[in-house]
Image: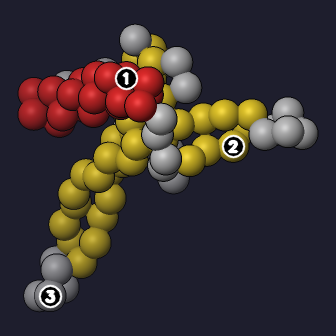
Amino acid sequence: MEPEKKFATGAISATVWNNTAKTKSGEDTSYRTVTLQRSYKDKNDAWQHTSSFRIADLPKASLVLSKAYEYLLLGREEEEEVVL
């Protein structure tokens, strides 16, 4: 599944996903979720991702979450990734 939108600054990113499900009555419905992660390279120089953040990461996490919320609230449909 491809993300709907991704906001990133440095190693911190917030990704918006568009999900679908069935209601109890069997109707299709859609909803959006947001994942927050930090990327880093491990000792083998391979990229990894975590949901743990250091103190210095918190301002960037706040920024990308704020941008994701703004995108969801305003209903923007831009397709490109936003790097802050």
For marks 1 and 2, give the CA distance: 18 Å
Mark 2: amino acid = Gln
Front disc: 1 or 3:
1
19 and 65: which is toward the camera: 65
For marks 2 and 3, give the CA distance: 37 Å
Q: Can residue 64 be seen by looking at this rendering?
A: no
Give above or below for 72 relative to 1: above
Classify mark 2: helix, strand or loop: strand
| Label 1 or label 2, whichever comes before in sequence order | 2
Write down the quadrant of residue 15 in the picture: top left
Tell me, for residue 48, which label it has, or none. Answer: 2
Tell me, for residue 60, which label it has, or none. Answer: 1
Give above or below for 82 relative to 36: above
Mark 3: amino acid = Lys
Q: Dot 2: within a 10 Å radius of its alpha carbon, few (fewer than 14), some, or many (20 or more) residues? A: few
| Label 2 or label 3, whichever comes before in sequence order | 3
Write down the quadrant of residue 19 in the picture: bottom left
Extreme-top residue of the structure: 84
Say which residue label 3 marks: 24
The total number of labels drawn is 3
> Residue 70's spot in the image, x, y percent?
15, 27
